[in-house]
Image: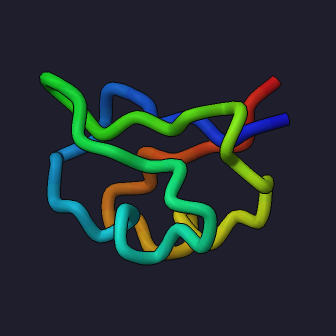
Amino acid sequence: MAYVITDDCVMCGSCEGECPSGAISAGDSKYVIDPAACVDCGTCADACPSGAIVAGE
């Protein structure tokens, strides 16, 4: 299951550059992850300083 970015996102951009599959992009109020492109590696969650990225269910 793809990772998701919660409303705790502070739009810092730390996750976008760390994603090996390019699945993360800036949305209107938070970054978003394309579930079709996410490879479920967790690199983005490790890079997020606000803990806003969690494993999807």
Expressed as whole percent of the image width and height from the top left, the position of residue 52 reads 42, 45
Percent of width and height locating residue 28 = 14, 23
Query: For the C terminus, which image quadrant?
Result: top right
Q: Residue at x 23, y 29 (%)?
A: 27
> Which residue shows up at 53% across the image and 68% down it?
19
Q: Nearer the viewer, residue 23 or 45?
A: 23
Q: Is residue 3 left or right of residue 5?
A: right
Q: Say how many tags the image has.
A: 0
Return the residue nearer the eye: 23 or 29: 23
- As rendered, which of 13 and 55 lies closer to the eye? 13
Please, is residue 45 above or below residue 30 in the view?
below
**Residue 14 position (above or below residue 57):** below
Q: Does residue 4 appear left or right of residue 51 in this picture? A: right
Name the quadrant containing residue 14: bottom left
Left or right, 33 with respect to 32, comes to: right
What residue appears at the point 62 percent right and 43 percent down from the top-left corner? 54
Q: Position of residue 55 (x, y in %)?
A: 73, 42
Q: Quadrant of the image for the N terminus?
A: top right
Identify the colour scheme used.
Answer: rainbow
Measured as percent of width and height from the top left, residue 46 is found at 56, 73
